[in-house]
Image (cartoon, rainbow, N blue to C red):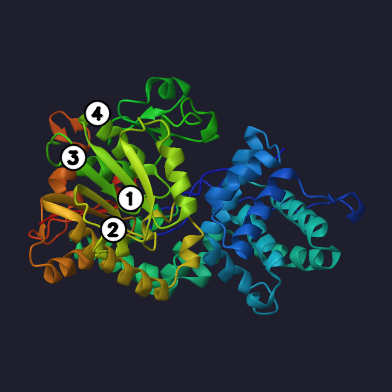
């Protein structure tokens, strides 16, 4: 059975609180070598396997972890331990690498990848979990011995003993004592280019510069599971009886503190879906921004894996509309069809097509009343949920994606009926992917206009004593005439979703 875990909590300066080990003498194993564990326990082995998939196969942990937990038959306690160990290690990789670099006698880039992953797992247990030092050392060494070999286990043991000589606070004070970008990068485990992009976005949207550390810290807090009962199809009450809490931000939504999502009533059937509440609101805002007329046709232009498409289709079914859910990938389109299976099949169709080609194809004469363009992006708004993405994405990716986003926007405008509604959505706060894309398409397309995006988002949210649960001044750009909206993980406890509503 795995050791107890705790949340990764930091104050606004990035220092961890309530670690439970501050001021205590660290305990090392007094066992003789022959008595120490020689095989990996299932929880730590599972975490190591997931990290290896992320490292070697560019896998996403949130996709690999549930299947691996089931395959290794972990009980609920071990599954929770594995989840915290995996996500916490991935989230803090940059910080841990800076610490390990001080404890290894060679550049850490020259370490074998399995050894480095094991060192990161051990470091997270030593510095950020309520795992006794002797247990973190013994179990990590046993993991290395069983999965990598006896030779590397000695190196891992020596390095982790050096790591354990200081607390996380002490390491951070030594390695990142100031407020430079490099110091903040180490302290908050964000690559400097992402850190600067967030700072620039805060300035653009008129937020206080002093909020910067709390935004970075929010990206490092494990998010709760967000759920939605598909409108007209799912029932939220069984979800609440199971232990979830009704959302205070979005209708028909709930948050759940933990556990296997597949066990939540309605999830396996598809009537309850796991989806960030910010994403839910962008889909609802497109539909609620204007009354739906009979026989409207809608398009989800980049629909995979189907979360927003399922919301749109269920809303279309209650309003007499139909929707086409398109994606460029066969695999992702199959995921969309799986998501849509609970909706009346007369309401929706799917297609596999390049969105840019669709809009520029002279043979494609279909025009749509409402279009959702959830554009491919860097995903910098979902760093809480996809912790490995911060280390995987590069500025070069940004250049490729922004070009594609502009092409997709132009294509979407061509497929929009005059007077129709186009929602441009990204899960990113980077202004090159958000505000600049919108201002540029307005310059390129003389007929395109920006609508009251903030009001649409406010109307999509729940009401609290006659007021929207989304305060306008927390979501709208600081430039009063721009009227684009940005959600924030620290303010709204959602992914950093961007939403702009356009027409022509």
Q: Which residue is mark 2?
A: 211
Let me know if residue 154 appears in the view.
Answer: yes
Please tell me whether mark 1 or mark 2 is closer to you in this view. 1
Q: Secondary structure at mark 3?
A: loop
Is there a contact, CB below 8 Å, between mark 1 and mark 2?
A: yes
Q: Position of residue 69 (x, y in %)?
A: 64, 42
Q: Is residue 197 left or right of residue 502?
A: right
Q: Residue at x 77, y 59 (%)?
A: 144
Is there a contact, CB below 8 Å, between mark 4 and mark 2?
A: no
Q: CA distance from mark 1 to mark 4?
A: 34 Å
| Location of the C terminus (image quadrant) | bottom left
| Location of the N terminus (image quadrant) | top right
Q: CA distance from mark 1 to mark 2?
A: 9 Å
Q: Which residue is mark 3?
A: 296
Q: CA distance from mark 4 to mark 3?
A: 12 Å
Q: Position of residue 106 (x, y in %)?
A: 69, 79
Q: Residue furthest front?
A: 363
Is there a contact, CB below 8 Å, between mark 1 and mark 3?
A: no
| Crowdedness near tag 2: few (<14), some (14–19) or many (≥20) residues, C-alpha within 10 Å | some
Q: Earlier in the sequence, mark 1 or mark 4?
A: 4
| Crowdedness near tag 1: few (<14), some (14–19) or many (≥20) residues, C-alpha within 10 Å | some
Q: CA distance from mark 4 to mark 2?
A: 41 Å
Q: Earlier in the sequence, mark 4 or mark 3?
A: 3
Q: Which residue is mark 4?
A: 318
Q: Which residue is mark 1?
A: 490
Q: Secondary structure at mark 1?
A: helix
């Amino acid at each position: 059975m795995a050791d107890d875990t705790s949340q990764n909590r930091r104050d606004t300066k990035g220092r961890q609180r309530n670690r439970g080990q501050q001021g205590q003498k660290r305990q090392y194993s007094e066992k003789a070598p022959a008595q120490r564990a020689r095989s990996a326990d299932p929880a730590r082995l599972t975490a190591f396997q997931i990290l290896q998939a992320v490292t070697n196969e560019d896998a996403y942990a949130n996709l690999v972890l549930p299947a691996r937990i089931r395959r290794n038959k972990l009980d609920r306690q071990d599954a929770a331990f594995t989840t915290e160990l995996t996500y916490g290690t991935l989230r803090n990789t940059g910080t841990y690498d800076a610490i390990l670099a001080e404890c290894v006698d060679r550049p850490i880039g020259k370490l074998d990848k399995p050894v480095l992953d094991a060192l990161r797992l051990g470091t997270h247990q030593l510095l950020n979990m309520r795992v006794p030092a002797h247990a973190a050392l013994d179990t990590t060494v046993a993991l290395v011995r069983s999965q990598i070999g006896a030779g590397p286990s000695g190196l891992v043991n020596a390095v982790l003993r050096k790591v354990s000589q200081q607390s996380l606070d002490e390491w951070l004070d030594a390695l990142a004592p100031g407020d430079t970008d490099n110091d903040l990068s180490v302290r908050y485990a964000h690559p400097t280019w992402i850190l600067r992009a967030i700072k620039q976005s805060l300035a653009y949207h008129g937020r206080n510069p002093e909020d910067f550390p709390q935004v970075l810290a929010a990206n490092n807090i494990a998010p709760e599971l967000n759920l939605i009962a598909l409108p007209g199809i799912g029932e939220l009450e069984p979800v609440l009886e199971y232990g979830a809490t009704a959302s205070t931000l979005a209708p028909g939504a709930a948050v759940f503190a933990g556990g296997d999502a597949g066990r939540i009533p309605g999830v396996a059937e598809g009537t309850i879906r796991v989806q960030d509440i910010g994403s839910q609101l962008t889909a609802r805002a497109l539909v609620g921004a204007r009354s739906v007329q009979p026989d409207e046709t809608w398009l989800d232009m980049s629909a995979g894996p189907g979360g927003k498409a399922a919301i749109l289709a269920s809303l279309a079914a209650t309003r007499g509309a139909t929707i086409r859910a398109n994606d460029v990938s066969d695999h992702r389109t199959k995921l969309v069809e799986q998501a849509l299976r609970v909706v009346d099949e007369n309401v929706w169709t799917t297609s596999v097509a390049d969105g840019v080609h669709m809009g520029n194809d002279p043979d494609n004469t279909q025009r749509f009343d409402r279009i959702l363009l959830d554009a491919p992006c860097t995903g910098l708004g979902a760093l809480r949920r996809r912790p490995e993405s911060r280390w995987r994405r590069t500025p070069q990716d940004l250049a490729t994606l922004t070009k594609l986003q502009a092409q997709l926007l132009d294509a979407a405008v061509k497929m929009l009926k005059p007077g129709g509604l186009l929602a441009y959505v990204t899960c990113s706060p980077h202004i090159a992917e958000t505000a600049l894309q919108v201002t540029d398409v307005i310059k390129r397309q003389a007929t395109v206009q920006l609508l009251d995006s903030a009001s649409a988002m406010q109307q999509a949210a729940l009401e609290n004593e006659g007021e929207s649960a989304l305060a306008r001044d927390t979501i709208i750009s600081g430039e009063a005439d721009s009227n684009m909206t940005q959600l924030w993980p620290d303010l709204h406890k959602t992914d950093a979703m961007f939403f702009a509503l356009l027409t022509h």
